[in-house]
Structure formats: C-alpha cells, structure tokens
Amino acid sequence: MKEFAGEVKNEFGKIVWPAKKQTVGTTAVVVVLVMIISFYLGAVDLLLGKVIGYVLR
C-alpha cells in the first residue's frame, strides 16, 4: 500500500494543471452552451407538447 501511495504521489507530480484564466474561460463557455441548449430543448418540448395536444383533440 505504501508503494502505491508513492506511485500516486509521483503521478500527481506529472500533472500539468491549466491556468486559472483558461479554467475560468472554459467554464464560462460550458455554462453558456448549457444555457443555450437548455433553452432550445425547452422550446422544442413546449412546441411538441402543443402540437401533440392539438393532434389529440
């Protein structure tokens, strides 16, 4: 177990973490895209709900 912990520590030393600016920028892009896709899917759901409701009457 001690050997494994040492290997994990060694591997963590090899990680190249992104800069804070890059992380914030990427996060902002993801949040904006999630909002756009959510709005689109909500609009499609609303539209299809109304169409199906109209057809079933």
Image (cartoon, helix red, strand yellow):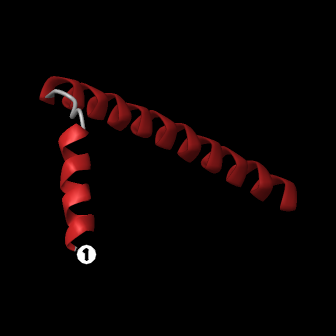
From the top left corner, tell me how far across and down residue 44 is, in percent: 64, 42
Coordinates of residue 54 in the picture (x, y in percent): 79, 53
Rendered residue at 19%/60% (across/down): 6
Count of numbered labels shown in the rendering: 1
In-image side of 24 versus 37 (left or right): left
Quadrant for the C terminus in the image: bottom right
Question: Position of 5 compared to 38: left or right?
Answer: left
Looking at the image, is 35 positioned above or below residue 5?
above
Give the residue at the far front of this rendering.
3
Vertical comparison of 41 with 18: above or below: below
Q: Residue at x 57, y 43 (%)?
A: 41
Q: Is residue 55 above or below residue 34?
A: below
Q: Amino acid at mark 1?
A: Met
Task: Indicate the quadrant where residue 19 lies.
Answer: top left
From the image, which quarter does the N terminus lie in? bottom left
Q: Can you see residue 17?
A: yes
- Return the residue nearer the eye: 31 or 20: 20
* Residue ID for mark 1: 1
Report helix, strand or loop for mark 1.
loop
Q: Is residue 57 visible?
A: no
Q: Relative to residue 55, is residue 4 depicted above or below?
A: below
- Badge 1: few (under 14), some or many (20 or more) residues near its Cα, within 10 Å? few
For residue 29, which quarter of the picture? top left
Which of 16 and 22 lies nearest the eye of the viewer?
A: 16
Estimate the x, y position of residue 46 in percent, counting from the top left: 61, 49
Q: Residue at x 19, y 72 (%)?
A: 2
